[in-house]
Amino acid sequence: MRNLFLCCAFLIFFANEVRAEIYFKPESISPLLTRQPILRSSVEYKREVSHILQLQKNIDQVELKKAIEEHVITVEMLVQNVMPQLTRADFPLLYKMLDSSNKTALGVSENAKIFWNTKRPYLEDKRIKALVEPHLNGSYPSSHTVSAQVLARILGLLFVEKREAFFVRAEEIAQHRVLLGMHYPHDLAAAKEVSLLVVGALMQTPHFLKDLERAKEEIALKIQN
């Protein structure tokens, strides 16, 4: 049943990603603009490993279920969690803009992963378990966190009164990646830096700004009516 759910989530994600266009090339944002990964020999690294082990020792099954369902990040994970009335069918311009923003963010984070080429926690330390189907790409930075933070910031511009709720949801998604053994806490910290760079670049991109305005108009028209 879980595999079927993940398969469906991936197919929905893939279909949306195929249609979406990126707003700028991933290499437009250099991985060197963020801090570098912490040394594996450092005290901080050992502290982070202990943190992951402690999380996995005392697993909250409700949180684990949520984390597994977030295996493939989608726009709906942010939007539907906070404002379920905003469906893809009713707000196509909003979702088109968010899909393209998400695809852009994922491209930037993947470019950084390739550059830094760090192993995921479950591959570095045998005591850490992969509690979801493993990802084989790099660990640093966390793509889930980059995407969630970018989406939360954009949605916060559109729905100011829900801004904090979007950030809470984005943080939940990020922390779940640590629980699953997919990321270290410093992967999340770097991802938040990357998300700021992505949003900053988006706000300087005419195509994005045009789509953002169209989404605002759609929201104003449909929510008022």
Image (cartoon, helix red, strand yellow):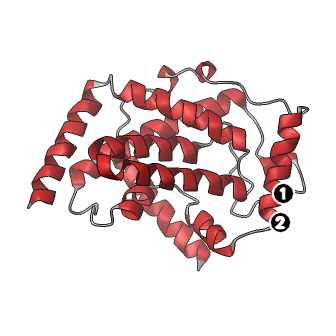
User: For this view, does 141 lie left or right of residue 70?
Assistant: right
Inspect this view and state whether residue 20 appears. Answer: no
Left or right: 128 with respect to 78? right
Q: Residue at x 37, y 63 (%)?
A: 80
Residue 110 seen from this side: yes
Q: Position of residue 114 (x, y in %)?
A: 66, 32
The amino acid beneath tag 2 is: Lys
How many neighbours does mark 1 have within 10 angstroms: few (below 14), some (14-19), or many (20 or more)?
some
Callout 2: few (<14), some (14-19), or many (20+) C-alpha neighbours within 10 Å?
A: few
- Badge 2 marks a residue whose secondary structure is helix
Q: Amino acid at mark 1?
A: Leu
Q: CA distance from mark 2 to mark 1?
A: 6 Å
Residue 164: where, in percent of width, then height?
A: 42, 49
Image quadrant in which the N terminus is located? bottom right
Q: Is residue 100 above or below residue 164?
A: above
Q: Where, by quadrant of the figure, is residue 128 drawn? A: bottom right
Q: Say above or below: 166 vs 30.
A: below
Dots 2, 1 in contact, CB < 8 A = yes
Instruction: Read off the residue under disc 1.
Output: 53
Q: Would you name the residue on which mark 2 appears?
A: 57
Which picture quadrant has residue 176? bottom right
Return the residue found at the far bottom: 1
| Residue in the image at 58% along x and 31% along y | 111
Q: State whether residue 50 is above or below residue 101.
A: below
Who's the residue at 84% across and 47% down the image?
Answer: 49
Q: Judging from the image, what secondary structure is the residue with disc 1 in? A: helix
- Give 25 or 62, whichever is nearer the viewer: 62
Q: Position of residue 218 (x, y in %)?
A: 15, 50
